[in-house]
Amino acid sequence: MTSPRAGVVAAGSWIVDRNKAIDHWPAEETVAEIVEERHEGGGNGFNVGIDLARLGLPAPIWAMGVVGDDAEGRFLRTTAQSRGIDTSRLAVSDAAPTSATDAMSSVATGRRTFFHAQGVHALMSPADFDFDGLPARYLHLGLPGLHRRLDGPCDGEVNGWVAILKKAGRAGLVRNIEVASITPERLAAVVGPCLPHLDLLVVNDREIGAFAGIETVVDGVTDVAACRRALAIVLERGAMDLAVAHFPTGALALARDGSAAERPSVAVPASAVVGTNGAGDAFAAGVLYALHEGRPLDGALALGHAAAAASVRAITTTGSVETAEACLALAERWGWRATL
């Protein structure tokens, strides 16, 4: 039976990104040249919300979290509204500035490094997440490890993320969580308690390894077999019906009912890569879009890869994501990798 619910709540981190493309990553006390600079939105809430809108999700998208009562916060709200995102539940606070990140993307390697100021996110609490009356189907929540108050004991729970997930569960939402690029030990400590309160998990190779307690990346290369084991372990430890792990060369999905899918990624030409900041969010948005629209598991991985491939063509996190059909057409033009 089709769920009467529709739409996605893009919740948690709404951040201003100061994106800079640099010619190379410098050693300390040396200089790198900034070759491009853009001021854009970022954070899981902003990125996935905007990506879903750009992909053309035929359902409502709600913003949820907290921004500062400043120019940066107004910029985030206005940008979301211009894409048709409902910001009525995105709280505004004058207690601290909007959260901000300097995102440095190396042209030489395509890799990015972040310098983050929590701002108002350090004060965010479960009370800032109101799901009452929302007819949404999915909750996409993040980012544990970067919100001082939510990362600790809160509302009688081990941390505020668990409290939020429980609220969302009572409201009937399918719950997914996104995590930040923090140490495996920190990931396990903050996100581990959340696993029994998730219905869906979409993370990368390092993150799934952190939750499972096994090494999934060796000398910078994904151990695909280890990722398969990690998915099975995480399903045992959590309550999710589906877990997905993505990495540069592909993605794996494993469902509680035993069904599984594997899909190599798009063969993106090196000359097309401008920056990878936001590619993981684009992958998650593609998967959420496909699941929302009832596409098969292999199709969800394909759209996730296609959206991620489209996203790397710009320094910004969301600027080059197109409609779902256009992203898939781009993937077909570039072709798919032969193997994981």
Image: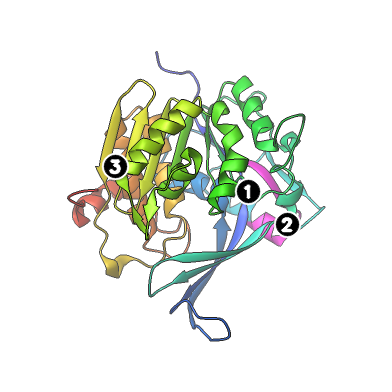
Tell me the residue that label 1 is attached to: 145
What is the C-alpha distance between the residues marked 1 and 3? 29 Å
Q: Position of residue 273 (x, y in %)?
A: 34, 66
Q: Which mark is residue 119?
A: 2
Q: Position of residue 136 (x, y in %)?
A: 54, 28
Q: Is 276 situated above or below 48?
A: below
Mark whose residue sits in front, 1 or 3: 1
Q: Is residue 179 left or right of residue 322?
A: right
- First-in-chain label (2 vs 3): 2
> Do the residues under discs 1 and 2 have CB atoms within 8 angstroms?
no
Viewer-closest of 288 and 326 = 288
Q: Is 332 situated above or below 60?
A: below
Q: Residue at x 64, y 51 (%)?
A: 146
> Do the residues under discs 1 and 3 have CB atoms within 8 angstroms?
no
Disc 3, SS: helix
Q: Position of residue 49 (x, y in %)?
A: 52, 44
Name which quarter of the figure residue 230 lies in: top left
What is the C-alpha distance between the residues marked 1 and 2? 14 Å
Q: Quadrant of the N terminus?
A: top left
Tell me the residue that label 3 is attached to: 302
